[in-house]
Image: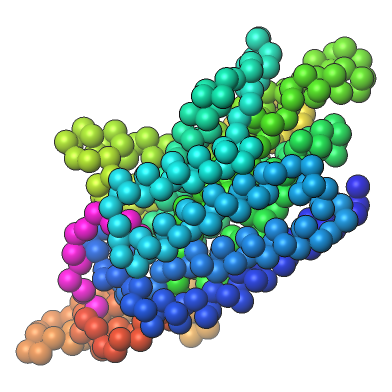
Amino acid sequence: MGQPVREYLLTLCVTAAVTYLLTGPVRKFAIATGAMPEIRARDVHREPTPRLGGIAMFGGLCAGLLVADHLDSLNGVFERSNEPRALLSGAALIWIIGVLDDKFEIDALIKLGGQMIAAGVMVVQGLTILWLPVPGVGAVSLTSWQGTLLTVALVVITINAVNFVDGLDGLAAGMVCIAAAAFFMYAYRIWFGYGIEAAAPATLFAAILMGMCLGFLPHNMHPARIFMGDSGSMLIGLVLAAGAISITGQVDPDALRMNLSLSGSEREATHAMLPVFIPLLMPLTIIAIPMADLVLAIVRRTWKGQSPFAADRGHLHHRLLEIGHSHSRAVLIMYFWAALIAFGTLAYSVHSASMWIVFVIVALSAVGLVLLLLPRFTPRAPRWAEAFVPPRYRRRKRLATASVGAEGTEEWDGDEEERAPVGAGVCGVNGATAIGPRSRFPDRRKTGASR
């Protein structure tokens, strides 16, 4: 068992390294080609930042699949299954659509059609849902049309859920990485713990997805030097959906049930039967937060008489900023809830008979609610220690206003990120802009294009 773990770790590291190393040149390419849209009314960043980060992530995906194909323990995945090739075909198509959107901002309906075509390409090559494990009924076989429609729907929903949550620096990549980590642990347990080889492709997809996100995050954390754009958000959404489809519709629940019946007593087998039905729940839990954001956005926009594809500032991360959380704190809160839901479901699937897991999940949920509703709080150092701490932790100071002819003073709490004085000079380049001086308050134009 140790050998496959090392090879998965090698695949993850190669994917992350290639993604990380490609992101710098891709950023320069995006700046040179003008893939730097102007600030929009719903954006939270302050300076034009290049997109096209999905180019580096797609390079990492190709490198991960190439390395896995040459490893002894993982080579069998490519020999026994056509799913890796199906994933690469669908990913290439959705990546091309994303790159075109990042540069030219294509229509939302065209993107939706492209997403459906990419899902259809994967279905044609064998990556589809064959049956569903239904509690109380067992494995329900699906017809070809039912499997195709369900697969396309799951791919489209997951892609758009991830795309909708991509609104803050590092948010989408971090949340998908957390989901992929939980999914990897679950798929690996199904493969090596229960001897179900059909779970091998999903395990590989999760490892590669983690590498893609980890390699891109150093460039995308606040303040971001580059955005993944639709070329990246739709790509990682498709890879996440591919893993969910593989382990939900390809793993035979009857084979897993037979394996469990031989693992111990009848009572132990009854508790261990939960993993048979977790494939139906795990894909939903790993995208629970993006799914909730997607549903709320559709309801909110429809209620206002707008198109479901119309952009606004009503997403969950925007609400956290409005409450008073800083950019970084809002991202960390979203990370917390994503990890709690994904790993909580994973822990319950492993020890479903242990009530302490439920108590821990409830306690952590209460902590999450407190953090969610806690208004912004910046601790202040005592006056004698102000010389030894960063400016943001010092007490309020009086600064003369820089306005010509203005009288009086304005309050400033030392947080240069949030309360920089108006007119205090040219706004610094956010590691992404090479267009010269620009006003701190840009002309934010409303547009329906996504970030």
Pick the quarter of the image with the C terminus. bottom left
**62, 261: nearer the viewer:** 62
Residue 15 showing in the rendered view = no
Image position of 257 with respect to 329: above or below: above
Residue drawn at x 53%, y 43% is: 121
The residue drawn where x is 45% and y is 72% is: 226
User: Is residue 255 found left or right of 87 in the rendered image?
Assistant: right
Q: Is the stretch drawn in magenta largely helix, strand or loop?
A: loop
Can residue 442 be found in the magenta stretch?
yes
Q: Residue at x 70, y 53 (%)?
A: 207
Q: Is residue 386 above or below residue 20?
A: below
- On the question of residue 148 being in view, the answer is yes
Image spot of residue 418 (x, y percent):
33, 70
Q: Nearer the viewer, residue 87 or 180?
A: 87
Q: Residue at x 37, y 35 (%)?
A: 295
- The reply, left or right, for residue 439 in relation to residue 95 is left
Q: Position of residue 262 (x, y in %)?
A: 92, 20
In the rendered structure, does residue 370 fall within the stretch colored magenta? Answer: no
- Residue 357 vs residue 144, the one in the foreground: 144
Q: Dividing the picture into quarters, in which one does residue 349 lie?
A: top right
Going by the image, does 411 lie left or right of 244? Answer: left
Residue ranking furthest to the front: 124
Relative vertical location of residue 72 with respect to residue 186 in this rendering, above or below: below
Q: Is residue 417 left or right of residue 285?
A: left
Q: Nearer the viewer, residue 372 or 16?
A: 16
> Total label count?
0
Q: Which residues are magenta?
A: 440-451
